[in-house]
Image (tube, rainbow, N blue to C red):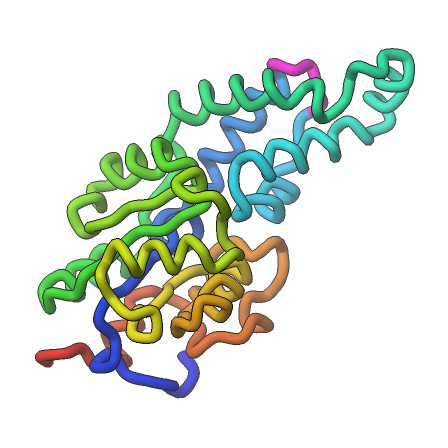
Amino acid sequence: MQAKMRDLTQIDAVIFDLDGTLVHTLGDFQVALHRTMADLDLPPVSDALIEQTIGKGSEHLIRSLLAHQLAQPEVKGVGQACPALSVDALFGRAWQRYQHHYLSINGQFADVYPGVLETLGFFASKGMPMACLTNKPLAFARALLQDKSLAHFFGPVFGGDSFERKKPDPLPILKTCEALGTAVSRTLMVGDSSNDAMAAHAAGCPVVLVTYGYNHGQPVQNTPAAAWLDSLGELPNHWLVKGQ
């Protein structure tokens, strides 16, 4: 962890991202997307591409992967012969099949990261209000938090479809702080990607990033933050908390 830029005695609440921060959900994404592509008679998408593409919301994920798959040589020729084979033409069915598959396996191929339960429990014991803010659809997020026994730690929970715009726009953080009843400058954002950092910086709140999550294939240490954590368990070990 880098040198502290502030301690948690100056923090009134914490907002946590979900995928790549609290729960390792890459397996869920991979299974749901492989099944979706099979339903569309498209080639299997690579696991590496899935990891690089997640994080900006499910709609962006599906559209990006459809565009990539439709550009493959074995599909491109078919698309030229059948102009209707396009991202826009396929998106509706792809989105329906993806939701079906993801909801059917949500949490089955995912694991809570080491240090998460201890950290959330520590903050809860100190009476620190916590919210979960993710770009994952809200129904998916709530079900995952329940499945992993994390839901009881959080007050507000918001997904990518909760507001007009998603992270990296600052609106979701501003709205989450409003729901928490805390000043943005005294609310800590904890995430795993440049999306979280950009949203936090634009909103005016401090941000800490974990190094083990999903950051579009880029080292998250290149993204400005108050600190970078190799484990979420480092947060209470290094920072002070009100009342301690």
Q: Is residue 18 above or below residue 43?
A: below
Q: With 165 as the anchor, is 72 left or right in this view?
A: right
User: Of residues 103 and 110, which is closer to you in this image?
Assistant: 103
User: Which quadrant holds the N terminus?
Assistant: bottom left
Q: Position of residue 18 (x, y in %)?
A: 37, 49
Q: Is residue 209 above or below residue 19?
A: below
Q: Position of residue 192 (x, y in %)?
A: 46, 60
Instruction: Determine which quarter of the picture holds residue 61.
Output: top right
Q: Position of residue 129 (x, y in %)?
A: 18, 61
Residue in the image at 67% along x and 37% along y: 64
User: Of residues 136 and 21, which is closer to you in this image?
Assistant: 136
Q: Main secondary structure of the magenta part?
A: loop
Q: Position of residue 70 (x, y in %)?
A: 78, 27
User: Is residue 148 shown in magenta?
Assistant: no
- Mark count: 0
Residue in the image at 70% along x and 24% along y: 88
Residue in the image at 59% along x and 72% along y: 222
User: Which quadrant holds the C terminus?
Assistant: bottom left
Q: Which residues are magenta?
A: 39-43
